[in-house]
């Protein structure tokens, strides 16, 4: 595996060559790192599923760098889709829309829709442009494990990837918001940095249905357990009075004096939701890596605005342990 700092353009050239030849490149986006392959090459895309140990029923997002790619990948780029794209791209919004015939079945797991986004990261955009093809990429982690927000996290979980472009820590820190546009209706499939309020402002005459808690699995990213650390993770609640020995504690502000623990990580000094989002996965990775930590405890945040996406990830990471007592 090659592992390089991105500042040198030749490295992006080399990574683009690997994509062209059907290989896999992990690259930074503004949300989390992606594990990319040429979206139009089914053999290359198959390697993503293999390396990530991802079930084949879970479709991939396609990353683009131009509006020409959008038009080639979808048969129905309607006004609402264009309005959302123009408003939020490049940025952390994935739009699910009808797919065109050039999109291989393996990318969409046989669905007739495809999720597309234009990432807001110069390395990602240059990679896509230089590779000369749209890039299919899930988050660059093993299926079900913590999402990677820096190159070290990728290397830890996917040591056999052909190439990692290192763009430092991602700025947003959690995966994109996913919406689908179905005629006049907009559905929220996965909460993220862009909130329902943001979307309703961009589409003033459209109601956004929040179906992030569906009966039926519309987006496998909605699996209840996902993004989990390899250690028990508990969400703090009133019934937890004291933490056991060897606990790691993740707090979002300096004012929580209720608990003490061997190791404490603050995602923010002041409960700033943007800071919490940016540091969430990194704090979980650090607790996972710290050998002295046996159990991880995390403070909840209020489920409003960006807090909805934060608690979506926290609850999924803690799902196994959320309902059990110590
Ligand atoms: O921020 C992100 O979205 C990151 C970066 C790398 O772009 N990518 C990411 O990909 O989070 P992944 O594969 O970990 O999550 C994509 C989610 C999956 O849960 C998948 O089920 C859903 O998007 N998805 C993809 N295509 C879909 C479709 N046609 N219909 C419904 N859900 C879809
Ligand atoms: Mg993922």
Image (cartoon, rainbow, N blue to C red):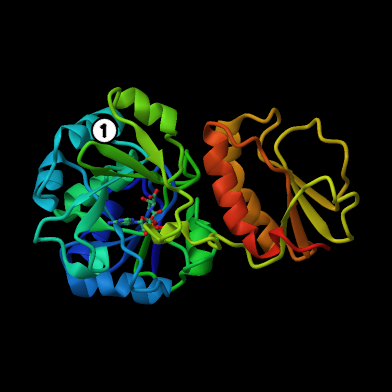
Q: Is the CB–ligand 1 distance for label 1 below 8 Å?
A: no
Instruction: Name the residue located 18 percent from the left edge and 33 percent from the top edge.
Output: 82
Instruction: Name the residue located 81 percent from the left edge and 62 percent from the top edge.
Output: 325
Figure quadrant of residue 203:
top left
Instruction: Name the residue located 46 percent from the left edge and 37 percent from the top edge.
Output: 193
Q: Position of residue 44 (x, y in %)?
A: 23, 71
Q: Is residue 77 visible to the viewer in this orientation of the structure?
A: yes
Label tally: 1
Which corner quadrant holds the C terminus? Answer: bottom right
Q: Is residue 109 above or below residue 168?
A: below
Q: Position of residue 19 (x, y in %)?
A: 23, 63
Q: Is residue 258 above or below residue 243?
A: above
Q: Position of residue 213 (x, y in %)?
A: 48, 51
Residue at image mark 1: 84
- Residue nearest the viewer, comparing 211 with 51: 211
Q: Is residue 59 above or below residue 134?
A: below
Instruction: Name the residue located 40 percent from the left edge and 71 percent from the top edge.
Output: 54
Figure quadrant of residue 219:
bottom left
Figure quadrant of residue 246:
bottom right
Q: Is residue 13 visible to the viewer in this orientation of the structure?
A: no
Q: Position of residue 267 (x, y in %)?
A: 66, 40
**Residue farthest to the front, as pictured:** 215
User: In the image, 320: left or right of 211?
Assistant: right
- Residue nearest the viewer, comparing 269 with 220: 220
Q: Secondary structure at mark 1?
A: helix
Which corner quadrant holds the N terminus? Answer: bottom left
Q: Quadrant of ligand 2?
A: bottom left
Near mark 1 (Cα within 10 A), the count class, few <14, some 14-19 or many ≥20, is: some
- Residue nearest the viewer, comparing 259 with 95: 95
User: In the image, 261: left or right of 125?
Assistant: right
């Amino acid at each position: 595996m090659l592992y390089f700092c991105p500042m040198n353009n030749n490295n992006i050239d080399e990574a683009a060559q690997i994509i062209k030849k059907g290989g896999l490149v992990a690259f930074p986006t503004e949300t989390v790192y992606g594990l990319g392959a040429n979206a139009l090459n089914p053999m290359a895309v198959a390697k993503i599923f293999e390396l990530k140990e991802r079930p084949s029923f879970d479709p991939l997002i396609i990353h683009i760098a131009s509006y020409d790619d959008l038009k080639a990948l979808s048969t129905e780029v309607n006004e609402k889709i264009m309005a959302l794209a123009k408003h939020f791209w490049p940025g952390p919004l994935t739009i699910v829309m009808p797919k065109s015939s050039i999109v291989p079945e393996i990318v969409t797991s046989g669905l007739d829709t495809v999720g597309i986004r234009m990432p807001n990261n110069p390395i990602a955009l240059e990679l896509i442009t230089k590779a000369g093809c749209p890039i299919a990429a899930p988050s660059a982690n093993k299926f079900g494990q913590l999402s990677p927000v820096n190159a070290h996290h990728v290397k830890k979980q996917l040591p056999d990837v052909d190439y990692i472009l290192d763009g430092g820590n991602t700025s947003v820190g959690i995966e994109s918001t996913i919406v689908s546009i179905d005629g006049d209706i907009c559905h929220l499939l996965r909460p993220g940095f862009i909130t329902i309020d943001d979307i309703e402002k961009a589409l003033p005459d459209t109601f956004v249905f929040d179906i992030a808690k569906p009966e039926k699995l519309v987006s496998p990213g909605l699996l209840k357990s996902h993004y989990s650390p390899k250690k028990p993770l508990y969400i703090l609640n009133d019934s937890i009075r004291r933490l056991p020995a060897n606990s790691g504690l993740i707090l979002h502000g300096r004012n929580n004096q209720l608990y003490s623990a061997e190791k404490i990580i603050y995602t923010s000094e002041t409960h700033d939701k943007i800071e919490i989002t940016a540091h969430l996965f990194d704090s979980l990775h650090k607790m996972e890596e710290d050998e002295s930590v046996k159990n991880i405890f995390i403070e909840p945040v209020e489920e409003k605005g960006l807090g909805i996406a934060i608690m979506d990830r926290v609850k999924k990471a803690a799902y196994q342990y959320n309902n059990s007592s110590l």
